[in-house]
C-alpha cells in the first residue's frame, strides 16, 4: 500500500508537478497553485469593491451587486463553470482557454461570497468609528480605507481564510472543463494504472491538505502578528520584566 | 463664531429640536445642560452635521454648515470643527500617536514628520507623553479621552465640540479630562460642551444653555443660572441634580 504510493510518486512526480509541460500546457500542482493564487489575489480586492457597493446607498451600485450575490449564492459553482465554458464562446465567438474561464468563474463566485464576509465585518464595527473619522474630515472612502477596513478585515480573518481555503479546493472543479490542474493529472494517472484509485487519490488528498493547511498556518501567524502589534505586547513584556527585576533584585 | 437660526429636527413624528436660536461668540465657552432626552446631544451633533437638520441654518466661522454642498467641501468644513465623543471612538488599530497624527497626514496632507512632531506636542499638552506608543486598549478611559481630545486638536480647529466627554468615565478619571478642557478654555478656544458636570460648568463656562424638550429654555452666565434659575423647569432640573 505505502510502497504503491511511493512507486506512483516515483513514476509520475513530474506529471503531478507540472503536467504535460513543456510538451503541453503547464499543469499539475503548478497549475493548481497558480490558479489558486490568482483566484485569491483577484477575488480579495473584488470582494472589497462588491462589499462597498452593497453598503452604498446608491441603488445603481447596490442593486446589481445584491443581485449578483444572491445569484452566486443560489447557484452551484459547477453550474457557473459549465455555463462559462459553454455559453461564453457561444455568445461571443471567442475561444476562451479553460484556465481563464475557471479563473474568472472562481473570482466572481468567491468574490461574491467574500464580499458578504467583508460587509459583515464592516457592519459589525458600528457607527462610532465612521463618525469619528468623518468628524475629523475624512471622506467616506478615506474613512473606509484608513479606519474601517483595517479593523473590519482583521476581525474577519478567520472567515476570509475559510473562503481562501475553499477557493483552493474549488480549483479541483476545473477538472470538468479540462483545466490541466493537479486533479486532472491525478485522474490521468488513475486512468493509466486502472487498479490503484485509492492510492492515486490519497496522494491527491494529501497534497491538497498540505496546501490548505499551510495557508491556514500563514493566516494564523499573520493574525497573531497583528494582534501582538495592536496589543503592544512586546514593549509591555519588556516593561514587565524590568519591573520584575526591580522587585526581585536584592539591594547590594 | 457659531450661529444657530431656527434649527428644527425631528425623527419621524418626534420633534427633537424645536427651533433653536443661539449664538456662540469667538472664544466663548458654552455649556449645554438639560434632562436626558432633551435634545442636547442631537443639537451639538448638528453643528458639524453628524446629524442633518429639518429646517433652519447653522453657520460656523462664517460657513453655512447645512447648505447643499459637494462632499469635499463638507469634509473640509468638518475638519475645522473638533468633535469629542462620549465613547472616545479612538481608532483601536492605531497607537495613541498614530491616532493623533493620522488625520493631519491623510486629510490635510501634512508631512509625516510635521504631523508626528505636532502629535508629540499635543500628547505633552494632555499629559500623556509616555503613552505615545500605547494602543487604545492599553489606556484607561480618562487617558483615551485625553488622546481623543488631542486627536481633535491635531486638525487645528478654531472650534471644539464636546458631547458628554466625561459621562463614560469612572469618577476618578473625570478630573483629568476636565482639566484638559479647562486648559483649552484658558487658551481662548471656542467651545460647546454638553455635560452633567455642574462644577465644571460653574468654573469654565461663559454661558450655560439649559435645554428642555428641544428648546433652549434658559441661556445665562453660570453664576446667574445656578443661583437664580428663571424657569421652574430649570429649578426642578437643578434641584434633582443636587440629590
Image: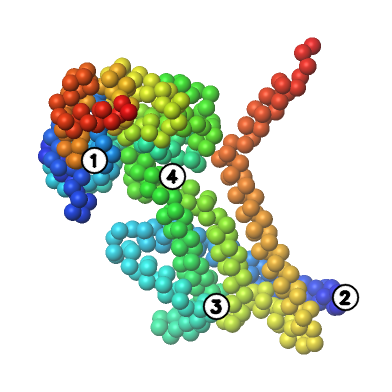
Q: Which mark is residue B39?
A: 1
Circle 2: element type: helix
* Colour setting: rainbow
Q: CA distance from mark 2 to mark 1?
A: 79 Å
Q: Is residue A24 above or below residue B109?
A: below
Q: Which mark is residue A146?
A: 4
Q: Chain of mark 1?
A: B
Q: Are marks 2 and 1 in contact (CB under 8 Å)?
A: no
Q: Chain of mark 4?
A: A
Residue that appears at 29% across and 65% down: A60
Residue that appears at 41% across and 35% down: B168
* Residue position marked by numbered label 2 in the rendering: A3
* Residue position marked by numbered label 3 in the rendering: A98
Residue that appears at 19% across and 41% down: B213
Residue B34, how many percent across, how many down?
Answer: 25, 34
- Residues packed near mark 3 inside 10 Å, few (<14), some (14 to 19) or many (20 plus): some
Circle 3: element type: helix
Considering every residue shown, the one lying at the far front of the view is: B243
Q: CA distance from mark 2 to mark 4?
A: 55 Å
Disc 3 versus disc 2: nearer the observer: 2
- Residues packed near mark 1 inside 10 Å, few (<14), some (14 to 19) or many (20 plus): many
Q: CA distance from mark 1 to mark 3?
A: 62 Å
2 or 4: tag closer to the N-terminus: 2
Amino acid at each position: 500500500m505505502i510502497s504503491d504510493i511511493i512507486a506512483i510518486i516515483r513514476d509520475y512526480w513530474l506529471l503531478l508537478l507540472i503536467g504535460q509541460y513543456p510538451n503541453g500546457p503547464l499543469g499539475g500542482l503548478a497549475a493548481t497553485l497558480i490558479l489558486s493564487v490568482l483566484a485569491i489575489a483577484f477575488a480579495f480586492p473584488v470582494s472589497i469593491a462588491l462589499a462597498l457597493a452593497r453598503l452604498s446607498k446608491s441603488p445603481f451600485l447596490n442593486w446589481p451587486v445584491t443581485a449578483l450575490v444572491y445569484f452566486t449564492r443560489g447557484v452551484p459553482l459547477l453550474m457557473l463553470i459549465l455555463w462559462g465554458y459553454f455559453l461564453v464562446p457561444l455568445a461571443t465567438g471567442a475561444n476562451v482557454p479553460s484556465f481563464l474561464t475557471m479563473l474568472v468563474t472562481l473570482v466572481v463566485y468567491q468574490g461574491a461570497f467574500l464580499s458578504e464576509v467583508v460587509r459583515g465585518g464592516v457592519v459589525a464595527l458600528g457607527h462610532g468609528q465612521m463618525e469619528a473619522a468623518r468628524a475629523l474630515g475624512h471622506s467616506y472612502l478615506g474613512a473606509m480605507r484608513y479606519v474601517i477596513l483595517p479593523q473590519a478585515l482583521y476581525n474577519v480573518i478567520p472567515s476570509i481564510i475559510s473562503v481562501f481555503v475553499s477557493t483552493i479546493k474549488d480549483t479541483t472543479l476545473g477538472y470538468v472543463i479540462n483545466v490541466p490542474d493537479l486533479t486532472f493529472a491525478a485522474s490521468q494517472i488513475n486512468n493509466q494504472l486502472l487498479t490503484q484509485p485509492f492510492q492515486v487519490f490519497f496522494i491527491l488528498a494529501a497534497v491538497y491538505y498540505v496546501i490548505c493547511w499551510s495557508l491556514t498556518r500563514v493566516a494564523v501567524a499573520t493574525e497573531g502578528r497583528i494582534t501582538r502589534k495592536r496589543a503592544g505586547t512586546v514593549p509591555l513584556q519588556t516593561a514587565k520584566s524590568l519591573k520584575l527585576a526591580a522587585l526581585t533584585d536584592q539591594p547590594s | 463664531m457659531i450661529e444657530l437660526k431656527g434649527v428644527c429636527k425631528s425623527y419621524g413624528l418626534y420633534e427633537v429640536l424645536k427651533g433653536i436660536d443661539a449664538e456662540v461668540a469667538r472664544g466663548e465657552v458654552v455649556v449645554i445642560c438639560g434632562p436626558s432626552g432633551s435634545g442636547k446631544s442631537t443639537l451639538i451633533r448638528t453643528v458639524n452635521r453628524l446629524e442633518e437638520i429639518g429646517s433652519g441654518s447653522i453657520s460656523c466661522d462664517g460657513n453655512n454648515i447645512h447648505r447643499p454642498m459637494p462632499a469635499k467641501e463638507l469634509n473640509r468644513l468638518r475638519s475645522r470643527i473638533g468633535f469629542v465623543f462620549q465613547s472616545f471612538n479612538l481608532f483601536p488599530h492605531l497607537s495613541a500617536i498614530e491616532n493623533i497624527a493620522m488625520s493631519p497626514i491623510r486629510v490635510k496632507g501634512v508631512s509625516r514628520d510635521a504631523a508626528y512632531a505636532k502629535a508629540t506636542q499635543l500628547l505633552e499638552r494632555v499629559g500623556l507623553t509616555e503613552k505615545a506608543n500605547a494602543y487604545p486598549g492599553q489606556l484607561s478611559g480618562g487617558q483615551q479621552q485625553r488622546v481623543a481630545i488631542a486627536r481633535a486638536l491635531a486638525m487645528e480647529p478654531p472650534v471644539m465640540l464636546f458631547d458628554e466627554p466625561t459621562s463614560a468615565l469612572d469618577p476618578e478619571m473625570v478630573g483629568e479630562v476636565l482639566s484638559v478642557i479647562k486648559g483649552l478654555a484658558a487658551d481662548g478656544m471656542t467651545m460647546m460642551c454638553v455635560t452633567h458636570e455642574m462644577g465644571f460648568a460653574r468654573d469654565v463656562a461663559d454661558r450655560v444653555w439649559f435645554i428642555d424638550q428641544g428648546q433652549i429654555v434658559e441661556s445665562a452666565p453660570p453664576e446667574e443660572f445656578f443661583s437664580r434659575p428663571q424657569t421652574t423647569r430649570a429649578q426642578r432640573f437643578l434641584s434633582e441634580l443636587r440629590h
